[in-house]
Image (spheres, grey):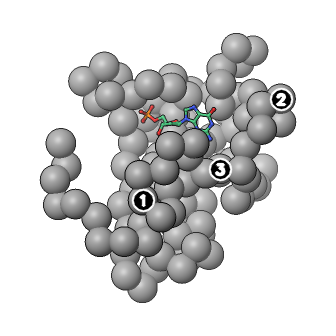
Amino acid sequence: MDDCLFCKIIRGEIPGDKVFENDKVFAFRDIHPQAPVHILIVPKTHVANVLEGADKGIVADVIAAAAQIAREQGLAENGFRLITNCGRDGAQSVEHLHFHLLGGKKLSEEMA
Ligand code: DGP
């Protein structure tokens, strides 16, 4: 999508600290990290959120990549959090489906 921030990062038009890429998924470090490891994992196909991506198999591709990245980042032993925000009440600020991979410390038990 022409004016989507994350599409521009995927295309290399805006710098992104890339940590992973395959034919379907791209991952880069969050610009405002909330944990020692904070990576955004996004599908290369533009869908706005998990509602749009769920029935196209896109979410499954992103989750598979997230599991690989978690292992590569050394998060498998102690654990991590993998979340996606959706819509206004979910506090989604960028309308391109993304999962936050957070780890590298004991995370808060608060979910909201
Ligand atoms: P969300 O609130 O779930 O939509 O998360 C969007 C995340 O995107 C937020 O944690 C900050 C991150 N972000 C916003 N703009 C940029 C950017 O230009 N580069 C990178 N790397 N991350 C960004």
What is the x, y in percent for residue 50?
Answer: 43, 34
Mark 2 burial class by Cα count in 10 Å: few <14, some 14-19, many 20+: few
- On the rendered image, what quadrant is the C terminus found in? top left
Left or right, 40 with reference to 109: right
Distance CA(mark 2)–CA(mark 3): 14 Å
Left or right, 48 with reference to 112: right
Distance CA(mark 1)–CA(mark 2): 26 Å
Viewer can see residue 15: yes
- The residue depicted at 42 percent of the width and 59 percent of the height is 35
Vertical position of residue 81 compared to residue 59: above or below: below
Instruction: Between label 3 and label 1, give the one nearer the viewer.
Output: 1
Distance CA(mark 3)–CA(mark 1): 14 Å
What is the x, y in percent for residue 103?
Answer: 42, 66
The three-letter code of the residue at mark 3 reads: Phe
What is the x, y in percent for residue 5?
Answer: 65, 25
Tell me: is circle 1 under 8 Å from ligand 1: no
Secondary structure state at the residue bearing disc 1: loop
The mark nearer the N terminus, 1 or 2, is: 2
- The residue depicted at 50 percent of the width and 56 percent of the height is 38
Q: Which residue is mark 3?
A: 28
What is the x, y in percent for residue 72?
Answer: 62, 75
Secondary structure state at the residue bearing disc 3: strand
- The residue depicted at 75 percent of the width and 27 percent of the height is 8
The mark nearer the N terminus, 2 or 3, is: 2
Q: Which residue is mark 2?
A: 13
The three-letter code of the residue at mark 2 reads: Glu
Report the residue that reaches farthest toward the top: 3
The three-letter code of the residue at mark 1 reads: Ala
Front-most of 3 and 31?
31
The mark nearer the N terminus, 3 or 1, is: 3
- The residue depicted at 71 percent of the width and 50 percent of the height is 17
Q: Which residue is mark 1?
A: 35
